[in-house]
Amino acid sequence: MDTRSRIHLGTQGWNHPAWIGPFYPPGTKPHDFLSFYSRAFDTVEVDSTYHATPPEHVVRAWAERVPAGFSFALKLPQQLTPEPLPHTPDLAQLELFCARAALLGDKLGPVLVQLGPEFGPERWDAVAAFLERLPRLPGGGPRWAIEFRQRGWLGAGPKLLELLHTHGVALALVEGQLKREEMMELAIHPTTEFAYVRWLGASGKKFEDFSAIQVNRDRELSVWAMALAALTARVPAVYGYFSNHFQGHAPGSAREMQRLIGANPVEPEKLRSQTSLF
Protein backbone atom coordinates (compact mmCIF):
# COMPACT_ATOMS: atom_id res chain seq x y z
CA MET A 1 0.00 0.00 0.00
CA ASP A 2 1.17 3.52 -0.81
CA THR A 3 2.35 5.02 2.49
CA ARG A 4 0.73 8.33 1.52
CA SER A 5 -2.71 6.73 1.83
CA ARG A 6 -1.87 5.83 5.44
CA ILE A 7 -1.01 9.40 6.44
CA HIS A 8 -4.16 11.38 7.18
CA LEU A 9 -3.53 15.12 7.41
CA GLY A 10 -5.89 17.91 8.36
CA THR A 11 -6.37 20.87 10.65
CA GLN A 12 -7.49 21.57 14.18
CA GLY A 13 -11.06 22.64 13.50
CA TRP A 14 -12.76 23.90 10.35
CA ASN A 15 -15.00 26.73 11.56
CA HIS A 16 -12.71 29.67 10.82
CA PRO A 17 -14.27 32.64 8.95
CA ALA A 18 -10.78 33.98 8.14
CA TRP A 19 -10.36 31.00 5.80
CA ILE A 20 -13.05 32.36 3.47
CA GLY A 21 -11.17 33.47 0.38
CA PRO A 22 -7.72 31.98 1.03
CA PHE A 23 -9.19 28.48 1.52
CA TYR A 24 -12.99 28.36 1.36
CA PRO A 25 -14.46 29.89 -1.81
CA PRO A 26 -15.60 33.51 -1.42
CA GLY A 27 -19.14 33.70 -0.11
CA THR A 28 -19.06 30.27 1.57
CA LYS A 29 -21.56 30.09 4.42
CA PRO A 30 -20.52 28.58 7.78
CA HIS A 31 -23.03 25.77 7.24
CA ASP A 32 -20.99 24.69 4.20
CA PHE A 33 -17.50 24.97 5.71
CA LEU A 34 -17.24 21.29 6.61
CA SER A 35 -18.39 19.96 3.25
CA PHE A 36 -15.84 22.14 1.43
CA TYR A 37 -13.15 21.22 3.95
CA SER A 38 -13.73 17.50 3.32
CA ARG A 39 -12.93 17.98 -0.38
CA ALA A 40 -9.40 19.04 0.54
CA PHE A 41 -8.61 16.87 3.57
CA ASP A 42 -9.74 13.45 4.78
CA THR A 43 -9.64 14.12 8.52
CA VAL A 44 -10.18 16.90 11.06
CA GLU A 45 -9.59 17.36 14.77
CA VAL A 46 -12.71 18.63 16.55
CA ASP A 47 -11.82 21.15 19.24
CA SER A 48 -15.39 21.85 20.35
CA THR A 49 -15.79 18.44 22.00
CA TYR A 50 -13.12 19.47 24.51
CA HIS A 51 -15.54 22.02 25.90
CA ALA A 52 -18.66 19.83 25.97
CA THR A 53 -20.14 16.60 24.66
CA PRO A 54 -21.96 17.56 21.44
CA PRO A 55 -25.71 17.04 21.01
CA GLU A 56 -26.82 14.05 18.96
CA HIS A 57 -28.13 16.14 16.06
CA VAL A 58 -24.80 17.96 15.75
CA VAL A 59 -22.81 14.72 15.48
CA ARG A 60 -25.21 13.31 12.90
CA ALA A 61 -24.92 16.51 10.86
CA TRP A 62 -21.13 16.24 10.86
CA ALA A 63 -21.29 12.70 9.51
CA GLU A 64 -23.79 13.66 6.81
CA ARG A 65 -21.65 16.48 5.43
CA VAL A 66 -18.53 14.46 4.67
CA PRO A 67 -17.83 11.58 2.28
CA ALA A 68 -16.97 7.99 3.08
CA GLY A 69 -13.38 7.63 4.20
CA PHE A 70 -13.38 10.88 6.17
CA SER A 71 -12.60 10.73 9.90
CA PHE A 72 -13.20 12.98 12.89
CA ALA A 73 -10.66 13.01 15.71
CA LEU A 74 -12.53 14.07 18.84
CA LYS A 75 -11.17 15.59 22.03
CA LEU A 76 -12.33 14.11 25.30
CA PRO A 77 -14.34 16.75 27.20
CA GLN A 78 -12.25 18.60 29.77
CA GLN A 79 -14.81 17.87 32.49
CA LEU A 80 -13.62 14.26 32.36
CA THR A 81 -10.01 15.23 33.12
CA PRO A 82 -10.33 17.72 35.98
CA GLU A 83 -7.59 18.62 38.42
CA PRO A 84 -7.11 16.64 40.55
CA LEU A 85 -7.59 13.79 38.08
CA PRO A 86 -9.93 11.18 39.56
CA HIS A 87 -8.79 7.56 39.54
CA THR A 88 -12.23 6.73 38.17
CA PRO A 89 -13.65 9.09 35.52
CA ASP A 90 -17.27 10.23 35.62
CA LEU A 91 -18.57 7.03 34.06
CA ALA A 92 -21.99 8.45 33.20
CA GLN A 93 -20.47 11.37 31.30
CA LEU A 94 -17.85 9.13 29.70
CA GLU A 95 -20.56 6.73 28.54
CA LEU A 96 -22.57 9.63 27.11
CA PHE A 97 -19.55 10.95 25.22
CA CYS A 98 -18.72 7.53 23.80
CA ALA A 99 -22.33 7.02 22.73
CA ARG A 100 -22.28 10.32 20.86
CA ALA A 101 -18.92 9.50 19.30
CA ALA A 102 -20.28 6.15 18.12
CA LEU A 103 -22.88 8.01 16.03
CA LEU A 104 -20.07 8.80 13.60
CA GLY A 105 -19.74 5.11 12.77
CA ASP A 106 -16.73 4.40 10.58
CA LYS A 107 -16.07 8.15 10.38
CA LEU A 108 -14.90 8.14 13.99
CA GLY A 109 -11.15 8.61 14.22
CA PRO A 110 -8.99 8.68 17.36
CA VAL A 111 -10.11 10.32 20.59
CA LEU A 112 -7.57 12.63 22.21
CA VAL A 113 -7.17 12.94 25.98
CA GLN A 114 -5.38 16.18 26.88
CA LEU A 115 -3.63 16.64 30.21
CA GLY A 116 -2.40 20.14 30.98
CA PRO A 117 0.98 21.15 32.43
CA GLU A 118 -0.39 20.75 35.96
CA PHE A 119 -0.47 16.97 35.38
CA GLY A 120 3.11 15.92 36.05
CA PRO A 121 4.53 12.39 36.45
CA GLU A 122 3.96 12.64 40.19
CA ARG A 123 0.32 11.91 39.24
CA TRP A 124 1.37 8.60 37.70
CA ASP A 125 -0.99 6.40 39.72
CA ALA A 126 -4.01 8.57 38.96
CA VAL A 127 -3.23 8.68 35.23
CA ALA A 128 -2.63 4.91 35.12
CA ALA A 129 -5.93 4.24 36.87
CA PHE A 130 -7.72 6.67 34.55
CA LEU A 131 -6.35 4.99 31.42
CA GLU A 132 -7.35 1.58 32.73
CA ARG A 133 -10.98 2.68 32.82
CA LEU A 134 -11.16 4.11 29.32
CA PRO A 135 -13.60 1.97 27.31
CA ARG A 136 -12.87 0.43 23.96
CA LEU A 137 -14.47 2.46 21.22
CA PRO A 138 -16.28 1.25 18.09
CA GLY A 139 -14.08 0.44 15.11
CA GLY A 140 -12.19 -2.68 16.11
CA GLY A 141 -10.05 -1.68 19.05
CA PRO A 142 -8.62 1.05 21.25
CA ARG A 143 -8.58 4.42 19.50
CA TRP A 144 -7.31 6.62 22.30
CA ALA A 145 -4.39 9.05 22.20
CA ILE A 146 -3.07 11.10 25.10
CA GLU A 147 -1.24 14.42 25.09
CA PHE A 148 1.02 15.45 27.96
CA ARG A 149 1.97 19.12 28.33
CA GLN A 150 4.38 18.49 31.22
CA ARG A 151 7.90 17.68 30.05
CA GLY A 152 8.56 15.29 32.90
CA TRP A 153 6.37 12.66 31.26
CA LEU A 154 8.72 12.34 28.30
CA GLY A 155 11.57 11.71 30.70
CA ALA A 156 9.74 8.61 31.94
CA GLY A 157 10.78 6.93 28.68
CA PRO A 158 10.27 3.13 28.61
CA LYS A 159 8.06 3.20 31.69
CA LEU A 160 5.64 5.59 29.97
CA LEU A 161 5.67 3.56 26.77
CA GLU A 162 4.89 0.40 28.72
CA LEU A 163 1.95 2.09 30.45
CA LEU A 164 0.48 3.32 27.17
CA HIS A 165 1.07 0.00 25.41
CA THR A 166 -0.72 -1.84 28.21
CA HIS A 167 -3.84 0.22 27.62
CA GLY A 168 -3.53 0.56 23.85
CA VAL A 169 -3.16 4.34 23.96
CA ALA A 170 -1.07 6.37 21.50
CA LEU A 171 1.28 9.08 22.71
CA ALA A 172 0.36 12.32 20.94
CA LEU A 173 3.48 13.81 19.36
CA VAL A 174 3.27 17.58 19.68
CA GLU A 175 5.39 20.15 17.85
CA GLY A 176 5.75 23.51 19.53
CA GLN A 177 5.44 22.73 23.24
CA LEU A 178 7.97 20.07 24.23
CA LYS A 179 11.40 19.08 22.92
CA ARG A 180 11.09 17.51 19.48
CA GLU A 181 14.12 15.27 20.01
CA GLU A 182 12.60 13.66 23.11
CA MET A 183 9.33 13.00 21.31
CA MET A 184 11.09 11.51 18.31
CA GLU A 185 12.94 9.09 20.55
CA LEU A 186 9.63 7.86 21.94
CA ALA A 187 7.90 7.87 18.53
CA ILE A 188 10.04 5.02 17.23
CA HIS A 189 8.37 2.76 19.80
CA PRO A 190 4.62 2.93 18.98
CA THR A 191 2.24 1.86 21.72
CA THR A 192 -0.79 1.07 19.54
CA GLU A 193 -1.74 0.71 15.88
CA PHE A 194 -1.73 4.38 14.94
CA ALA A 195 0.31 7.52 15.52
CA TYR A 196 -1.11 10.94 16.39
CA VAL A 197 0.72 14.19 15.61
CA ARG A 198 -0.24 17.78 16.44
CA TRP A 199 1.51 20.89 15.15
CA LEU A 200 1.00 23.80 17.52
CA GLY A 201 2.59 27.23 17.59
CA ALA A 202 5.81 28.01 19.39
CA SER A 203 5.20 28.43 23.11
CA GLY A 204 3.87 31.92 23.80
CA LYS A 205 3.49 32.88 20.12
CA LYS A 206 -0.03 33.44 18.79
CA PHE A 207 -1.40 34.78 15.53
CA GLU A 208 -4.51 36.93 15.33
CA ASP A 209 -4.98 36.72 11.55
CA PHE A 210 -5.55 33.21 10.20
CA SER A 211 -5.83 34.09 6.51
CA ALA A 212 -2.24 33.46 5.39
CA ILE A 213 1.06 31.76 6.22
CA GLN A 214 3.05 34.30 8.24
CA VAL A 215 6.24 32.52 9.27
CA ASN A 216 8.59 30.18 7.45
CA ARG A 217 8.82 26.79 9.12
CA ASP A 218 10.21 24.80 6.22
CA ARG A 219 12.86 23.19 8.41
CA GLU A 220 10.35 21.86 10.93
CA LEU A 221 8.05 20.65 8.16
CA SER A 222 10.89 18.78 6.45
CA VAL A 223 11.92 17.09 9.69
CA TRP A 224 8.36 16.01 10.35
CA ALA A 225 7.83 14.80 6.78
CA MET A 226 10.71 12.36 7.30
CA ALA A 227 9.27 11.38 10.68
CA LEU A 228 5.85 10.67 9.17
CA ALA A 229 7.41 8.44 6.53
CA ALA A 230 9.29 6.56 9.25
CA LEU A 231 6.13 6.16 11.32
CA THR A 232 4.30 4.45 8.46
CA ALA A 233 6.84 1.64 8.71
CA ARG A 234 5.76 1.07 12.31
CA VAL A 235 2.00 1.68 12.36
CA PRO A 236 -0.83 1.18 9.83
CA ALA A 237 -2.10 4.76 10.12
CA VAL A 238 -0.83 8.21 11.04
CA TYR A 239 -3.13 11.13 11.89
CA GLY A 240 -1.78 14.68 11.91
CA TYR A 241 -3.43 18.04 12.61
CA PHE A 242 -2.17 21.60 12.17
CA SER A 243 -3.11 24.57 14.33
CA ASN A 244 -3.53 28.04 12.86
CA HIS A 245 -0.85 29.07 15.35
CA PHE A 246 1.78 26.87 13.71
CA GLN A 247 2.28 29.27 10.79
CA GLY A 248 -0.82 31.45 10.75
CA HIS A 249 -2.98 29.47 8.32
CA ALA A 250 -3.53 25.78 9.06
CA PRO A 251 -4.82 24.71 5.61
CA GLY A 252 -1.66 26.09 4.00
CA SER A 253 0.53 24.20 6.48
CA ALA A 254 -1.36 20.96 5.86
CA ARG A 255 -1.10 21.33 2.08
CA GLU A 256 2.64 21.91 2.32
CA MET A 257 3.04 18.76 4.37
CA GLN A 258 1.00 16.86 1.79
CA ARG A 259 3.43 18.04 -0.89
CA LEU A 260 6.43 17.00 1.20
CA ILE A 261 5.16 13.45 1.64
CA GLY A 262 4.38 13.16 -2.07
CA ALA A 263 0.62 13.59 -1.92
CA ASN A 264 -1.36 15.87 -4.23
CA PRO A 265 -3.00 18.66 -2.22
CA VAL A 266 -6.30 20.17 -3.31
CA GLU A 267 -5.51 23.81 -3.92
CA PRO A 268 -8.04 26.55 -3.06
CA GLU A 269 -8.46 27.28 -6.78
CA LYS A 270 -9.86 23.79 -7.29
CA LEU A 271 -12.37 24.27 -4.47
CA ARG A 272 -13.49 27.48 -6.14
CA SER A 273 -13.95 25.72 -9.48
CA GLN A 274 -16.03 23.04 -7.77
CA THR A 275 -18.37 25.73 -6.47
CA SER A 276 -19.58 26.46 -10.00
CA LEU A 277 -20.75 22.87 -10.35
CA PHE A 278 -23.36 23.21 -7.60
Image: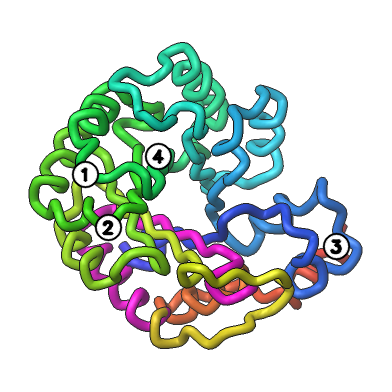
**For residue 277, which numbered disc appears in the image?**
3
Mark nearer the N terminus (1 vs 2): 1
Distance from Cα at disc 4 to Cα at disc 3: 40 Å
Element under disc 3: loop
Mark nearest the camera among 2 and 4 is 2
Which circle, 2 or 3, is nearer the viewer?
2
Residue drawn at x 51%, y 32% is 77
Classify mark 4: residues with Cα within 10 Å, few (<14), some (14-19) or many (20+).
many
Alpha carbon distance from label 1 to label 4: 16 Å
Helix, strand or loop for disc 1: helix
Q: Which mark is residue 113?
A: 4
Counting from the top left corner in percent of width and height, residue 97 is at 51, 24
Q: Is residue 104 above or below residue 12?
A: above
Q: Where does label 1 land, which residue?
A: 121
Type of amino acid at the residue the image marks with label 1: Pro
**Mark 2 lies on residue:** 151
Provide residue 63's location: percent of width, then percent of height.
63, 37
Amino acid type of the residue tagged 4 in the rendering: Val
Nearest to viewer (mark 1 / mark 4):
1
